[in-house]
Image: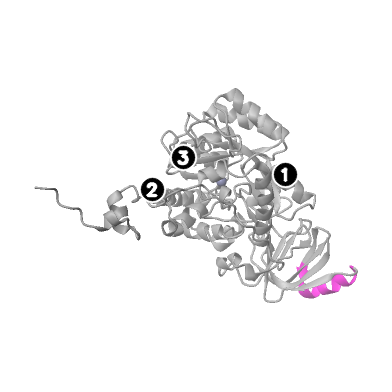
Amino acid sequence: MGVYLIENGTLLDATGTKPKPRTSVFVKDNRIAKIGPADEMKRFVQSQGPHKTINAAGRTIMPGMIDAHVHPSYGDIISIEELDIYASCEYRTLRAALACRKVLRAGVTSMVCPGGNWNINVALRDAINAGLIEGPRIAAGSRYISTWNSTGSFFPAHLEHPPSSFAVICNTRDEMIRETRTAIKNGVDIVKVSGDGDTSTQAGMDLVGSITLDDLKAIAEITHLMKKKCTIHARSGEKTAAAAKAGFDWVIHASYMSDEDLGVVIDCKTPINPTLSLLVNSIEWGPELGQHPAITEGYKREVDAASKILSKAHKAGVMMMAGTDSGQVAVPYGAWHAREMEHMMHYLGMSAMEAIRAGTINAAFGLGMQGQLGTLEEGKLADILVVNGDPLADIQVLQDPQRLEVIIKDGEIIDTTTPLPQPRIYPWEKPLVIWSDPRLPDQDYVRKHAKSKPRWMQQPTPKAAE
Ligand SMILES: [Zn+2]
């Protein structure tokens, strides 16, 4: 860990106060030791022994970003089978290590990983903390505690649920409590529950709640007993409100709340991680990339509903945490983390400062580290970005890797210049789709368009003998 003077930049400390020009930040070991006007700091550091100076003139100095919703174990998936079945636990873990490096290089110095396959989130967290691999600081989530009727239970009831799935099926309260205790024994920071379905999933997994209020209370009680946090995938308003009542620490999505549901969330002071990036990116590019039209339409409905109720929630003071659901092809690792803030401004009516706080200090709540991370203040951990641009004037500068000139995590400058490996993707990692054009079963179509035809097909059909 180094000793650095980040000199003479504009300090955007994310406390909500106005940016301070001509300010320097002194980093010692892994802490922010002192912040002050550039001239004063120049004098101060003379008594501090050898240090490296980073010239931040014309630059913004801000906290490292925090993505409250990343799934390193997924592998930038294009299908449910890829998410739950292909790739061994061992290969998936090694692949996830590269995902972590990509996320860090996007200026995300901490991430919350609510859910994933096997116990990979915990292994990554520990390997990163031990210095074995490079990546953001991680709050490690468990596998999803799902029922047969909620997201996570993707395969028909006549199949056994795959052990490689990101979800573990718990249909009774006893099973849920047992799994909560198992996850905590295995070292998770966060217990993840699946409360309902997804937009455009199959029958029996609709956007209605599939877990009872008492089940949720039981999970929250055990989780909090052992000083861990719990969060829930809940797109429906009913399950969002139930999770808030049960004492869940925050809710992911919360897209379809009624005013009454929102009232419960406000009363319980439950933060929300909307996760707009997956929806908006899929709407923008999905149709060109072969996304099924029903998924596109479903996401459009959800963005409509979410933008209406969540902008109300934001106005009412509900804490919003920025998180992208990265690990799926619409939101690949390292690519779109900062875009969530832009979506929060566009769809939820946030100011740039509010969006930046959602992606720093608010998201730090997911790690239980708001006292240590998320703002630049003396005594906090040194997770710092030096940005060529003013994110308050143009939030998109945070999405441009060229403009993230210095990324410091835990007092160390991250090397962003050595090219990352570009591993080849094995065919067995991808779903085996034999024929992809839905017109193919129509043999007339095939005969008309086939480039090479057998002779009998080329000749006109002889008229039947009269
Ligand atoms: Zn997710």
- Residue 115, by quadrant, is top right
Residue at numbered disc 2: 294
Q: Which mark is residue 123?
A: 1
Residue 73 higher or lower than 151, as above or below: below
Look at discs 3 and 2 and give the one toward the viewer.
2
The three-letter code of the residue at mark 3 reads Ser
Task: Assign a secondary structure to mark 3.
Answer: strand
Look at discs 1 and 3 and give the one toward the viewer.
1
- Residue 384 is situated, as x and y percent measured from the top left of the image, at 72, 62
- Return the residue nearer the eye: 80 or 440: 440
Number of other residues with Cα within 10 Å of mark 2, as a class: few under 14, some 14 to 19, many 20 or more:
few
Colouring of the image: one colour
Left or right: where does residue 379 sit relative to residue 283? right
Q: Earlier in the sequence, mark 3 or mark 2?
A: 3
Q: Quadrant of the N terminus?
A: bottom right
Q: How many marks?
A: 3
Task: Assign a secondary structure to mark 1.
Answer: helix
Which residue is painted at 56% across and 51% down in the image? 427
- Residue 24, by quadrant, is bottom right
Query: Where are the magenta residues, as a range?
Result: 36-48
Number of other residues with Cα within 10 Å of mark 3, as a class: few under 14, some 14 to 19, many 20 or more:
many
Cα distance in 3D space between marks 2 and 1: 37 Å
Cα distance in 3D space between marks 1 and 3: 32 Å
Cα distance in 3D space between marks 3 and 2: 19 Å
Q: Which mark is residue 113?
A: none
The three-letter code of the residue at mark 2 reads Ala
Magenta-drawn stretch, dominant element (helix, strand or loop): helix
Which residue is painted at 57% across and 48% down in the image? 428
- Residue 391 is situated, as x and y percent measured from the top left of the image, at 60, 67
